[in-house]
Amino acid sequence: MGDARPEPQTAPPIPGIRDIAPGTRRVGIGWATMTWLITGGAGYIGAHVARAMAGAGERVVALDDLSAGIASRLPADVPLVRGSSRDGDLLKRVLTEHAVTGVVHLAARKQVAESVAQPTRYYQENVGGLATLLEAVAEAGVQRFVFSSSAAVYGNPDVDLITEDTPCAPVNPYGETKLTGEWLVRAAGRAHGIATVCLRYFNVAGAAAPELADTGVFNIVPMVFDRLTRDEAPRIFGDDYPTPDGTCVRDYIHVADLAEAHLAAARRLGGRTGDLTVNIGRGEGVSVRELVTLIGEITGDTRPALVEARRPGDAPRAVASAVLAARELGWSARRGVREMVESAWRGWLLHRGG
Ligand SMILES: NC(=O)c1ccc[n+]([C@@H]2O[C@H](COP(=O)([O-])OP(=O)(O)OC[C@H]3O[C@@H](n4cnc5c(N)ncnc54)[C@H](O)[C@@H]3O)[C@@H](O)[C@H]2O)c1
């Protein structure tokens, strides 16, 4: 990729505030300087958020332990502190030395099957790590906090559109850590006067640039690419669901739209108090069969899918109501599923050398 950025730092030393491009913007009735710490900033979504926020003129510093992240995903003008969001001493120093005024917390483990096999690790990392971060945030007097939550908090509700009032009933430890995380974020917000936003992402796909693409094979789009690349037919788990074509229906959101939602959330927090929890989706359902057909069209590999047995725990339909995000954040998704698959495929070809 020809990336010339320096190796990420291990703490100490921490990059000084002079390392950050100056960025001052009007907040409320006066001029204030905002600096956002993005945990998990070298990850798939975090790097998109860093790029969107820095591109919009916000000061940004990323923190990532690079357990799953890639340093070269970050824009050259975004400093990266290599370290863990579970390291309270490091966090306190980063928050102080960079004069951080808001945090976007994405660092987490995110694999459902792994969370079923290793629940204590998931609670320690996703909930314990969040508690450590919130303590440091409260102590440093940071007053804005955006939390990466997930549609996994809902479990499998039997509704046409999932609103934020749909009861939460997660069906795996990953979803439980996200729901517990939301409770913790709101409680800490109330206790310490931190304005908070929890963003419940639906199915994230695509890439704003090929080098930013998701390199994991945990979601349906890369899973189908993986099968095709290995000269195998895509698999569809169940075609006898009560949906129009019998396959499961999901709400896919382009990661570039998701990144813009974070920017909207961060800006909403300027000068506000209280908490907000919103779905981040398109409000439109796409069936697995429709998605697999589209992937065939875009990759040029139109071999028929194999239909296999249903997987336990798959809901027939999970589609967001996107009304609250539009009203509260002034944000709506702009990119469609074709753009998601095309951009994800370009990223796959870059990373997998297809
Ligand atoms: N990808 C999705 O479809 C999806 C859907 C809903 C919610 N989310 C949430 O979004 C967030 C980001 O997901 P992603 O897809 O970008 O995953 P990712 O694995 O690409 O990014 C996570 C980043 O956090 C870093 N990290 C993990 N633990 C850390 C720690 N203790 N300290 C510092 N850095 C740490 C990893 O190195 C990685 O760069 C996660 O909280 C995830 O649960 C993702």
Image (cartoon, rainbow, N blue to C red):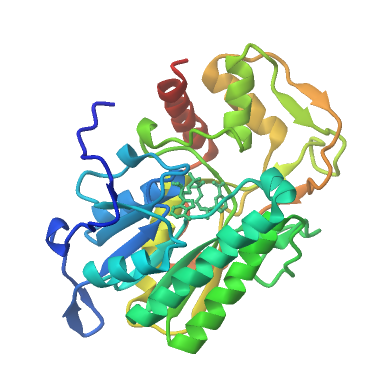
Q: Is 157 situated left or right of 221 in this image?
A: right
Using the rendered view, name the quadrant where residue 96 is placed: bottom left
What residue appears at the point 57 percent right and 16 percent down from the top-left corner? 229
Relative to 254, say whether 105 is above or below.
below
Quarter placement of the N terminus: top left
- Above or below: residue 141 compared with residue 172: below
Please indicate, yes or no, whether residue 124 appears anywhere in the rendered image: yes
Residue 81: image x %, image y %?
30, 54
Q: Image point 32% across, 55% down: which residue? A: 62
Query: Looking at this view, is 74 or 291 the one in front?
Result: 74
- Check the image and name the residue furthest to the top: 231
Residue at screen point 27% across, 59% down: 60
User: In the figure, is residue 7 to the left or right of 138?
Assistant: left
On screen, residue 322 versus residue 47, left or right, reads right
Say left or right for 351 vs 101.
right
Q: Nearer the viewer, residue 265 or 6?
A: 6
* Residue 228 drawn at (x, y percent): 61, 17
- Residue 71, quarter of the rendered image: top left
| Residue 70 screen position, x and y as percent | 38, 39
Residue 334 on image: x %, y %: 44, 49
Q: Residue at x 47, y 62 (%)?
A: 86
From what the image shows, is residue 216 above or below residue 297? below
Seen from the viewer's position, the closer of residues 109 and 13 is: 13
